[in-house]
Image: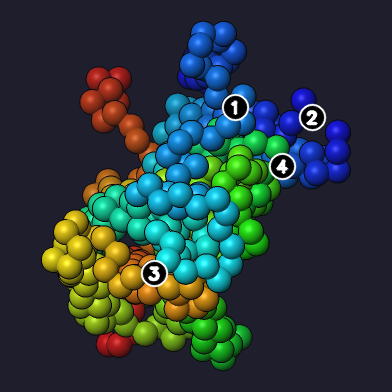
Amino acid sequence: MSPNNILILSVTLAMLAGAAAVVSIRSLIGAAILEGVVSLMAALLFLQMSAPDVAITQAVIGAGLSTSLFVIALRRSNSGQEDSDE
Amino acid sequence: MNNPVFLFGIGAFALMMIGLYGVLTHKNIFRLILSLGLMETGVNLFIVAASYWDGVRAPILGKIFNVKTADSYADPLPQALVLTSIVIGLGVTALALALMIKYREGTGTLEMEDKREEEVEE
Amino acid sequence: MNKIAAILMIGIISYGVYAAFSSTQPGSKPFKRKAQNDVSRAYLAKTVNGKKHSSIMRGMKGLENSSSNIVTAVVLDYRGFDTLGEVTVLFAAIAGIGLLLGGQKKRVITPAGPIISSLAPWIALFILITSAYVFLHGHLTPGGGFPGGAMIAAGFLLMVLGFRTKPSGVFRMLESFAGLSFVLVGLLGFLKKGSFLQNFMGTGEMGSLFGSLFITVLYAIIGIKVAAELSSGFGSFVKEDLEEEHE
């Protein structure tokens, strides 16, 4: 394993752990924030795949705008109270 | 396994499958939208990973570009497709969230349940 | 029970994909090819119309397309029509949001704190400068109109959070105007060169800021359009919160 591969492997594992947390965590707002983390890790992977255009777009839209959109929509639909699975 | 392309492909596919698991097991609409977002990210990663080869450069012609060494550049076509796909994904996610807000206003809950089943049980 | 069925289904799908990818049939070798196909190679070498160049370097003139960033060249020049369709899909999604969330009941919200309201304009200013840089240099550096427009929308969202400014009808006008100008540029290409969205402004020196004017113009239009669309869409998400405070 070269150092580059170790970097890629750790970023991939962080992304997958975040994704597993998104589908299993109880708090909805925490899941929304973790989705942003997954997007950021995906943007790093795009950068490693020498696709800088896609990486910038994924970082701005996936990690920035989409997370804030999730939080705004959740706050508006929830009006403050907690709402979780099961 | 020295070539990271397998790592990229397996990671992207695993992300897709985690998103699919979330879609299949949850009844909360917000979680469904989040899981669909995960699946979308996984598919985008997979498309770009399928065109990647170890050591390719970004498709930006900075120095001299020789036609014979075109293989040392990453394939620009999948990247262009994924670029637009991400933006469309944001629009679709926003539309789904708007529908979720309307559903919440109509039913008072974010859970998807079959009302007829409950009535039968009662 | 639900979860076991889900895991079972995922296992079946994973096995199917594994079997498909490890197949030894001819023509089924994704992830295992190094040679690029001819279309992508033609995009990279800028020889779609058949003008052969043995090598391409910075500062060259008279190329088929003078954008250093090949992804930008594909998005706007070679496949500009697809981009028009994509922008239309985005427009439809945002119009659907406006339809769903327009004219809602009012609700109390907490105002922004002093940190956000004092720092928001400065951060928004720098976001605006960065996004203008990103979409003006779309043909030289990674980026372009889509992330640039999304950055402007993020700055607008920050201003909304800081100041409760009400999203006005200007965004809708700007959005329609930008959409129309994209089609107009395409029609100008049709009138001057004979096909829709064809480059009629000529190609300049590769690597200079105004070397590919056509792509700069189109990316500026797309940036304005994406920014206006996303801002008005997000505006409908936060709109009802704002009406309470003005009363």
Residue C145 seen in render: no
Instruction: Name the colouring of the figure.
Output: rainbow
Q: Amino acid at mark 4?
A: Gly
Residue at mark 2 to residue at mark 3: CA–CA distance = 42 Å
N-term mark: 2 or 4: 2
Mark 3–mark 4 Cα distance, whole angstroms, equals 31 Å
Q: Residue furthest left?
A: C191
Residues at discs 3 and 4 both on one chain: no
Q: Residues within 10 Å of mark 3 (few under 14, many from 20)?
A: many
The image shows residue B30, relative to residue C186, as above or below, that is above
Chain of the residue under label 4: B
Q: Secondary structure at mark 4?
A: loop
Q: Which residue is mark 4?
A: B55
Q: Which residue is mark 2?
A: B2
Q: Nearer the viewer, residue C108 or C59?
A: C59
Asked if marks 3 and 1 fall on the same chain, the answer is yes
Q: Which mark is residue C203?
A: 3
Q: Nearer the viewer, residue B22 or C27?
A: C27
- The 10 Å Cα crowd at callout 1, few under 14, some 14 to 19, many 20 or more, is few
- Looking at the image, tell me whether mark 3 or mark 1 is earlier in sequence order: 1
**Chain of the residue where label 3 is placed in the rendered structure:** C
Residues under labels 3 and 1: Cα distance?
A: 33 Å
Name the spot of residue C141 as percent of width and height, x first.
56, 66
Q: Which mark is residue C33?
A: 1
How far is mark 2 from mark 4, CA to CA? 12 Å
